[in-house]
Image (spheres, rainbow, N blue to C red):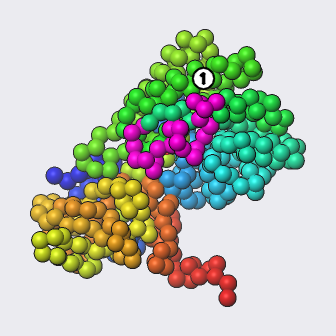
Amino acid sequence: MFPLNVFPDTTKIDEQGQLTIGGCNTLDLAQEYGTPVYVFDEETLRSRCRSFVREFDQRAPGTQVLYASKAYINLALVRILNEEGLGLDVVSGGELAVALSGGLPAKRVDFHGNNKSPQELAEAVAQGVGRVVVDSFHELELLNRIASDAGKTQDILIRVSPGIDPHTHAYTTTGIIDSKFGFAIQTGHAAEAIRQALGASHLQLRGLHFHLGSPIFELEPYRAATDLVLRFAAEFREEGLNLQEFSPGGGFAIAYTRDQQPPAVSEYAEAIVSTMNATCADLGMPRPKLIVEPGRSIVGPAGVALYCIGAIKEIPGVRKYVSVDGGMGDNIRPALYQAAYEVVSAGKATVEPDDLVTIAGKYCESGDVLAWDVMLPTPETGDIIAIPAAGAYCPSMASNYNLNPRPPIVLVKDGKSRLIRRRESYQDMMLCDVV
Ligand SMILES: *Cc1c(COP(=O)(O)O)cnc(C)c1O
């Protein structure tokens, strides 16, 4: 059975048994734009934005949805997100520059990161970002000094680490004690950070933030951490902490493989907001404004990578390697943390998969494999394969390893396609070289 659940909403199989997305035939897209190419479905993208805004706003009116740029951002995407009423969470001066160049008001940007540079903090303050989410004592001091020099008071949140394990890969777990992110509650560091922030002359502490990791397939970690952090915040009421804002971050899961069933956006919203309501009522505290930061769950399901099969090598009794024209340079997730993907043959979508193969990339690393042991209809050189759920943390983590140009991104809608990022050229890759 074709794993339609991991593909964009508009995905169909036409009469020739070929995959179409947004009304565009994927073999035609591969022909027109070359491979590898990333196809983003505009309808899925917008519908994911709308469901976050709707599901949170109807339970907690005024919730701010900030898209986590690191999942993938560029100018065209900023415009779409802006049109849908989202703000952005950025983690670098580069992401901030793209957000502002794309026309997003700075007030709708929050600045994250465990080691923002003095220059990045100065840019954030000068541009007037909504909040800086402070992650260390070093940053508390530095930001206060920078804001003071600029003659401004900067709104901040403090990122706490609630010590709750979200049961995801160790490399993508962030809210436990042994993490480079945030002030741990258990060690007393979070308490100390709140006191310092309240005493800082040019910082306005508006609330607390946590982010547990990603992707989180369970609701319970959100419930537990929300309750714990709100109770922790209440301990500082007498010391002057007025919790106006609260953010449980992002990390909402998507289906990468056919068997995965992540909670719906409505279920995440219900878990978080109902916990906030219950805990705030118990503490006699008004419910703070909620800020959520979905990244993967917005752009991930909208993106499909297309590759062309080249060399096929069968090692008898061992394995059949099917090599494609991309790999770890455009999608490092399998190599980095054993991420698993579905793979389908875009021109043989109705043919029963009968061949067990391993999809290898073209990069000079044995670990450069996109998918181990997947079933495909007998692959042939020249076939186009599609890897779904590839919108998040693939192009954004892309590199020029082996000096392969990074692939283009094509936006599809209603049978029309347009580039929102062109393929890099050899010249692009030499642009910063100095002889
Ligand atoms: C990465 C990150 C997110 C987004 O995570 P997703 O899994 O893409 O939703 C949100 N907030 C913070 C602080 C992050 O670091």
Identify the element where label 1 is drawn: helix
Furthest toward the bottom, the residue is: 435
What's the amino acid at mark 1? Phe
Inspect this view and state whether residue 297 appears.
no
Residue occupied by mark 1: 232
Residue 189 to residue 107: above or below: above
What residue is rendered at 50% in x and 60% in y?
396
Question: In which image quadrant can residue 67 be found?
Answer: top right
Q: Position of residue 206 (x, y in %)?
A: 70, 30
Q: Magenta stretch containing residue 186, yes or no?
A: yes
Q: Could you say which is closer to the camera, residue 186 or residue 417?
A: 186
Q: Position of residue 57 (x, y in %)?
A: 52, 29
Q: Position of residue 253 (x, y in %)?
A: 39, 42
* 29 sits left or right of 42 in the view: left
Residue 168 to residue 311: above or below: above
Inspect this view and state whether residue 426 appears.
yes
Q: Magenta stretch containing residue 362, yes or no?
A: no
What residue is rendered at 44% in x and 69% in y?
329
Which quadrant: the C terminus? bottom right
Q: Position of residue 358 (x, y in %)?
A: 24, 67
What residue is rendered at 47% in x and 33% in y?
164
What residue is rendered at 56% in x and 16% in y?
280
* 269 sits left or right of 191 in the view: left
| Magenta span | 166-188
Q: Could you say which is closer to the camera, residue 203 or residue 306?
A: 203
Q: How many marks?
A: 1
